[in-house]
Image (tube, helix red, strand yellow):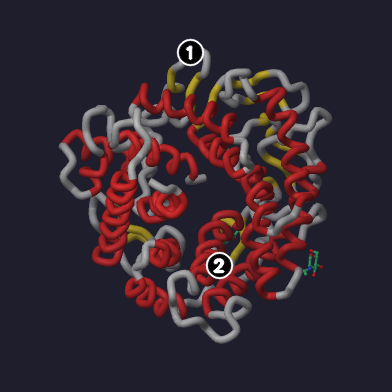
């Protein structure tokens, strides 16, 4: 879900430099340092003003528990700290997280808890060596972060005990699935487990996590329409679709990404084949012919909404993982041009009218900082932005769409991007 943000910030950072020449080593170094400063700023702000609450509210500078008493931002930050080489910060946070207990009476989204908490803990666990941390006994098959990840995953697993194997959307961490829990959930929340659950099974030796993720994926893909498209919401007890618009964005996106990343992580051809199966109808019915992806009826393939979404932004990244760089560049160029046109990506964009959909234009997180084209957004993050920036940011915060912790979760991808350029490209 955050991939579109990544796209946006990458575009933003790249625009800081002259876009007509390739990035030099110095550019990359300075962009990486700018990203590191952004991260430091966001993390120390959280620790200073919000900890031990879940999140920082950037306008009032106060903490807020959005997830119970989860210290969500802290867990979200673990792998970022390691990745950026802040070992002191990591050790401090690790000590706190180590003492955490997830046995509390709180209803959580199975999907969000998996990608943020389980995923965050596994990444931190796996990065110990790279960060030259003292390795726990038995690492990588043992370790405190892995134990915690397994504990949280065990609390999510009962959600998968349905007739189809597709999970309920929510679960109580202490008491399991509530009796009156709705069985209807979105496609992404059914198909986005194989990366974390696959890793957990391979590391722990217990196949139950990977089995649950695979069963869920298989049931979902088996429920595709006659022309091969997936819908948007499904009843996990009956396998009947309750929202039948097919698209690659909101409510669906990460299933495709996880098939591709899962196949790479687990070197599993069958996951890639599943993606290929879904890819054909996507290209036939959802691609406009000009590499924007729109929405269609999953049964007839007829276009229902001629909109592209900010959440589609993961698609070119996924295509480049597959080595389909030319196609990725064509899609990316579309997104980049829209971004240039509006100084940010509207949540929904009408591909014929070439305009944002009203009501979906100004509230998107990506639009929040800049309406003007002339300002360096990094300035804003350091508190020196103009009053206009602050107003826009304030509006976004009031709409609840700007999340301080995204400034920690998202830039880590950008940091890796510039680090990876530095490692692989010779100047
Ligand atoms: C969790 O959800 C169930 C079902 O909607 C509800 O009965 C229960 O009170 C909720 N628990 C908490 C802690 O919010
Ligand atoms: C799965 O659900 C069934 C029926 O609701 C229940 O009898 C069974 O014990 C559950 N199994 C697990 C492993 O939780």
The residue sitting at the top extreme is 353
Q: Pointer 1: residues within 10 angstroms few (<14), some, or many (20+)?
A: few
Relative horizontal placement of residue 315, taking residue 168 as reference (left or right): left
- Identify the residue under disc 2: 122
Check disc 2 and report its element: helix, strand or loop: helix
Point out the quarter of the image occupied by ligand 2.
Answer: bottom right
Relative horizontal placement of residue 152, taking residue 387 as reference (left or right): right
Q: Residue drawn 63% across and 51% down?
A: 261
Percent x, y for residue 381? Answer: 25, 47
Q: Residue drawn 49% across and 43% down?
A: 3
Q: Nearer the viewer, residue 38 or 165?
A: 38
Q: Nearer the viewer, residue 126 or 350?
A: 126
Q: How many marks?
A: 2
Is residue 224 depicted above or below 300 in this figure? below
The numbered mark at residue 337 is: none
Q: Nearer the viewer, mark 1 or mark 2?
A: 2
Check disc 1 and report its element: helix, strand or loop: loop
Q: Quadrant of residue 83?
A: bottom left
């Amino acid at each position: 879900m955050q991939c579109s943000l990544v796209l946006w910030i990458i575009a933003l950072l790249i625009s800081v430099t002259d876009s007509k020449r390739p990035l030099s080593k110095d550019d990359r170094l300075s962009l990486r340092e700018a990203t590191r400063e952004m991260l430091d700023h966001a993390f120390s702000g959280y620790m200073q003003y919000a900890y031990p609450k879940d999140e920082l509210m950037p306008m009032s500078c106060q903490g807020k528990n959005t997830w119970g008493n989860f210290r969500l931002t802290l867990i979200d930050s673990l792998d970022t700290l390691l990745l950026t080489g802040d070992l002191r910060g990591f050790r401090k946070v690790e000590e706190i997280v180590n003492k955490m207990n997830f046995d509390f009476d709180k209803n959580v989204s199975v999907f969000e808890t998996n990608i943020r908490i389980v995923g965050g803990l596994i990444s931190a666990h796996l990065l110990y060596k790279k960060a030259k941390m003292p390795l726990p006994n038995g690492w990588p098959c043992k370790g405190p972060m892995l134990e915690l990840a397994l504990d949280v995953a065990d609390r999510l697993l009962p959600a998968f005990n349905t007739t189809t194997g597709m999970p309920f959307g929510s679960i109580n961490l202490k008491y399991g699935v509530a009796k009156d829990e709705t069985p209807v959930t979105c496609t992404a929340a059914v198909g986005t487990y194989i990366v974390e659950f696959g890793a957990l099974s391979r590391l722990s030796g217990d196949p139950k996590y990977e089995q649950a993720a695979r069963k869920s994926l298989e049931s979902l893909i088996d429920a595709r329409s006659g022309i091969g498209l997936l819908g948007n919401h499904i009843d996990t007890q009956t396998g009947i679709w309750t929202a039948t618009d097919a698209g690659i964005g909101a409510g669906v996106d990460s299933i495709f990404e996880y098939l591709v990343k899962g196949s790479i992580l687990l070197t599993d051809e069958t996951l890639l084949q599943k993606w290929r199966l879904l890819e054909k109808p996507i290209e036939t019915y959802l691609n406009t012919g000009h590499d924007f992806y729109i929405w269609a009826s999953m049964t007839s393939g007829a276009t229902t909404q001629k909109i592209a979404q900010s959440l589609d932004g993961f698609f070119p990244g996924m295509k480049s993982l597959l080595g389909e760089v030319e196609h990725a560049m064509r899609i990316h160029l579309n997104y980049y041009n829209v971004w240039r046109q509006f100084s940010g990506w509207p949540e929904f964009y009408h591909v014929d009218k070439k305009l944002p959909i009203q009501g979906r234009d100004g509230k998107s997180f990506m639009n929040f900082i800049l309406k003007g084209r002339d300002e360096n957004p990094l300035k804003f993050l350091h508190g020196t932005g103009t009053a206009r920036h602050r107003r826009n940011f304030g509006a976004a915060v009031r709409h609840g769409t700007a999340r301080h912790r995204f400034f920690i979760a998202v830039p880590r991808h950008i940091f890796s991007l510039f680090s990876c350029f530095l490692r692989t490209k010779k100047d």
